[in-house]
Amino acid sequence: MGRVPAVAPRVVAAHIHAFFGLPAEVLPGLPAPVYALDAGRMQFDAGKIIQRLEGEAFPGCRKWIGVVEGDLFVPIFTYVLGEARQGGRCALVSLCRLAQKDGPDASPQPTVLERCAKVALHELGHLFGIVHCPDPLCVMHISGDVHELDQRRLALCRYCRRQLDQRLCQP
Amino acid sequence: MKSKPEILVVDDERIVRESLFHWFKNGGYAVATAASGAEALEKMAGRPAELLFVDVKMPGMNGIELLERIKAEYPAAVVVIITAYGSIESAVEAMKKGASDYLIKPFKPEYLTLVMEKIDQQLDMARECNYLKAQLEKKTRFENIIGRSAPMQAVFDTITQVADQDTSVLLTGETGTGKELVAKAIHAKSRRAHHPFVALNCGAMPENLLETELFGHQKGAFTGATHPRKGFLEVVNGGTLFLDEIGEIGMKMQIDLLRVLEERRISRVGSSQTVPVDFRLITATCKDLEKEIAAGRFREDFFYRIHVIRIAIPPLRERKEDIPLLARHFLSKISHETGRKVDHISQAALKMLQGYRWQGNVRELENAIERAVVLSTGPLLGVDDFAFLHAAQAKPAPGGSLLEMEKGYIRQVLDDCAGNITRAAAVLGINRVTLHRKIKRLQLSRGPQR
């Protein structure tokens, strides 16, 4: 949504297919969600974007994930890396805080893309009704910032995997 | 899997309620929302949440007022205050009124994660504590005091009536009737149950030692007082103080204790400073304190202070129907403790025990069961196993002849054995023929003499 590097959604789709075993495709881009911009905070309201996207129709798609360049927030938090509602149809991933932009500690692109994939898998898990996991290595474990995110594996633990398999069997 | 607390989010802003609702749902929590303090109280009345997130600025009842109401009506509930208008003063006010944490929105997501981790631990500990308290209540609820007889039921009823008051209780009864057990039962059923129970036998130590035990002492107060020491009156700290053998204490100690009961302050030995004390007093005696007062050995004013409620614990001979129950209880306990496989007591032995005088009351009965178990040769305790009781009981009449002694003893044994010659002979350690001959010579009747 908006000016997002084309590789980012392709990486997300590939990881969904590889680690969740689900077919995923990259849909045509959507305009930047300016309707959700909070001028005071200079951030995008994730709730408003999700509400708009939930109303959209994406034929043939069971769930959809929006990748945005801008910084996302929900009212109580200063920012969120991603957002989804339990059992919903739409989730969001923000690239904004996944990269250290300047100086010698600037994150290399592969790291940024891996982080993007992790957030996407996490939020997709919520769309399938999986809650936060206590296993610190599981991608469903909560991550407050990129340092915590880097501790997660690009995989579900066996309990979350089992839950996902059960959900996938449901209509 | 650990159970997660039920959460209630209280905020007049819909988007805040929704944000927190979805975040907690993603975390696997059961979460409800309320748009006002009044709605929150309604929801709590229907289904109390363990954890509340409460906004400060709300129309009508504000968050601090809601916090006070919640803590008053649901003291175990954990409340986290969230506000967009934070200040140190408001944070301190909220924490003083019982808030567990204070978050200024918007906050970083990891702050909420940390708060939840802390609260989870807090709730786990509270749950464990409640569980242990419930177990403790179950365990001490008259469990250690055994009795189905009418006199004991009256004691239990009185314990239930007086336990939750703070009034002083005087327990009277012969030695070995279980006065300390009754004191513990009163404490366990009182609002002081989760504070210490401190027991002191006033008859077991000299008065100067009793003084320092009760009041404590300062360093250097006397030879050997190398450190300051708190006395039991301070240590009891909100709990119950049980003074056994209260009739043994001297006049000076009675005066000192009377002052403590009136002023609720003490000073340690060697100190002029006073400290407040908080305890409930239970005393016990096997003396007749009214007689002691008449004899000038006990102060009347002190007596009336300690004797607001009196519970008289009946001697074992006045509740014979409890003896089989007690005997079986002690048998089970002692067999388990000693590892001896003795698990039954015969009806004849029980009948014999019920006929015995038990001057030492329950303590003597327990002692007799223990002796019988230790010396038993099989899994069943019979009359023979308690033969020692008759040897202990037989006392020569003052100035009586040997013949009268023998007659009295054989009579006693026959009564205890309900006239059964075989059993009586076993107890006396003679054969049946010899017993028959003695009965004839001493002109005793065979049947029980009542």
Image: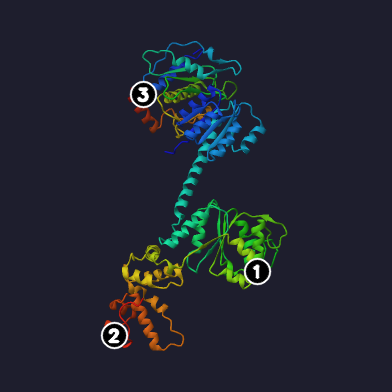
Badge count: 3
Check residue B251 in the rendering and tell me which mark sits there, or answer none.
1
The image position of residue B182, as x and y in percent, is 49, 60
Instruction: Tell me the CA gap for discs 1 and 3.
Output: 89 Å
Please say whether residue B378 is visible from this viewpoint. Answer: no
Instruction: Tell me the CA gap for discs 2 and 3.
Output: 99 Å
Check residue B434 in the rendering and tell me which mark sits there, or answer none.
2
Q: Chain of mark 3?
A: A
The image position of residue A71, as x and y in percent, is 55, 19
The image position of residue B155, as x and y in percent, is 47, 60
Closer mark to the observer between disc 2 and disc 3: 2
Check the image and report above or below for B362 versus B261. below
Closer mark to the observer between disc 1 and disc 3: 1
Check the image and report above or below for B227 versus B435. above
Q: Secondary structure at mark 1?
A: helix
Q: Decide: few, some or many residues near mark 3? Use Cα within 10 Å; few <14, some 14-19, many ≥20.
A: few
Q: Chain of mark 1?
A: B
Name the image quarter holding the C terminus of chain B: bottom left
Q: Amino acid at mark 2?
A: Thr
Name the quadrant containing residue B99: top right
Name the image quarter holding the N terminus of chain B: top left
Residue at 62% from the left image edge and 35% from the top image edge = B94
Q: Secondary structure at mark 2?
A: helix
Residue at 60% from the left image edge and 56% from the top image edge = B235
- Give whichever of B28, B161 is nearer the camera: B161
